[in-house]
Amino acid sequence: MVSVPRLVIAAPASGSGKTTVTAGLMAAFAERGLDVSPHKVGPDYIDPGYHALAISSAASSGASGAGRSRVGNARPGRNLDAYLCGPDRIAPLFLHGAAGCDLALVEGVMGLFDGAAGQGELASTAHVAKLLRAPVVLVVDASSQSRSVAALVHGFASWDPGVRVAGVILNKVASDRHEAMLREALEGCGVPVFGALRRTRAVRAPSRHLGLVPVAERHAEAVDSAAALAARVREGCDLDGLLALARSAPPLSGRAWDPQEEIHRAMDAVPGAGVRGGRAARPVVAVAGGAAFTFSYAEHAELLTAAGARVVPFDPLRDERLPEGTGGLVIGGGFPEVYAPELSANEPLRTAVAGLAASGAPIAAECAGLLYLAHSLDGEPMCGVLAAKARMSERLTLGYREAVAVSDTSLAAAGTRVRGHEFHRTTIVPGAGPEPAWGLVHPERRTEGFAQGDVHASYLHVHWASVPGAAARFVDRCAPPAG
């Protein structure tokens, strides 16, 4: 049994202010000197970046901490997705990410009870809160209501007895009088109010075609916003009460997820496969980063390392060469469409990536990586590894997918079944190569992506914690450093 103080920050609907309130709470508690562990329900890559920044910048400032200083707090934002990873992995992944923390805060997704389409509560915030046995604090947009807030909160608190809605934070409150009316209405509801935050335009994060602009693209502004959010939450929320509520969460049973154990378990299931972890020559796996490639789950690098790789990040916008000794390449998601001219202008790196692919080295590319490997993106030359052209589209492609590997690739043997997620406003023609990467089987049937040599390129985002054998297989195919 493991005791982790924790709260789930949820809302009745998207747009209520979950992200800003959660980031403000994380920053405010980090300023107090607490080691805060950030988590996000669902597949979203952008919010965890804001969470990690809020914590690290606030911890470094030490603005009001009576506790110990946590300068340089490096906890990454982590996702908890019961569809991608399975319900049984949620608590272990949480315990892994929250190990040793003073407080874990979990931001929900959409409305509290909204989950995977047509699959009941699966992957909803409520589902994850139940799996974590965590108290829920509901962020309510109170901008257009007064007494009705009590009916709203009562409905959410009583809808599912297995979900403990233990508090409310009122957001977008207009005035002292408005706050008094809201609090009076909620007095008989049985759900305490832990804060009331005024409407403000001072800490709004800019958005574009896929949601918030990632923190890597506006770091200085985001740091200032985090400080403003922390001040707003300090003034408007009962931090001591919220911390006491978090500490009331019961112990969790089970063991924390361990990438080393996962890798060895995956390899034990594949006769004759080896793990490079014990070898002296560890292959270098280059991982694309920087402003154009910001989408990645923290567990991916951990699994690659556990499988014996030396993970080396690089920035395709700035670096003209791949890291020295690169034996494999991982290019995750992001916004190459925003930086297509700059990526195209870095011809030396494009040539190096094409050369690596031609050498037979394994390359795993998801969504943004798929576009970068294409012949062109919005008319700008890309790496030319794939005979396909990509462009921006008016249509948003979004949703969970079930898929099966069509071909043997660097990530999966043919027949391997996975669950993934698509999220893009681009199209690529053709949508699949002569040997597709995946055959989608739900909610629609089609082939998708490219399996070309040891290149695996696809729109599908897969969380490797659900298929740790992908990391082991990838590293096993990497060439060790020369000499």
Image (tube, rainbow, N blue to C red):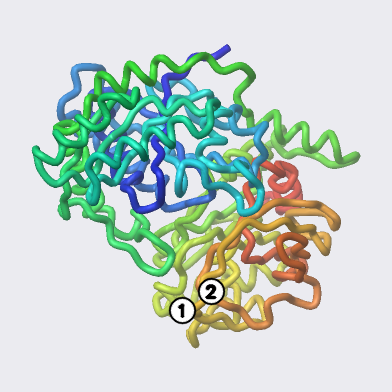
Contact between labelled residues 1 and 2, with CB atoms less than 8 Å apart: yes
User: Could you say which disc has been placed on residue 350 in the image?
Assistant: 2
**Going 49% across and 74% down the picture, which residue do you hit?**
348
Q: Residue furthest top?
A: 1
Q: In the image, residue 12 lies at what x, y percent?
A: 40, 44
Residue 481: x and y in percent read 65, 50
Q: Give the mark nearest the N terminus, 2 or 1.
A: 1
Indicate the secondary structure of the residue bearing disc 2. helix
Quarter of the image for residue 74 reads top left
- Horizontally, is 222 left or right of 416 in the view? left
Q: In the shown orientation, is residue 435 left or right of residue 333? A: right
What residue is rendered at 75% in x and 58% in y? 403
Figure check: 268 above or below 17: above
In the rendered image, is residue 452 in sight?
A: no
Q: Given the image, on which type of amino acid does mark 2 rest?
A: Arg
Q: Which residue is label 1 attached to?
A: 344
Q: Secondary structure at mark 1?
A: helix
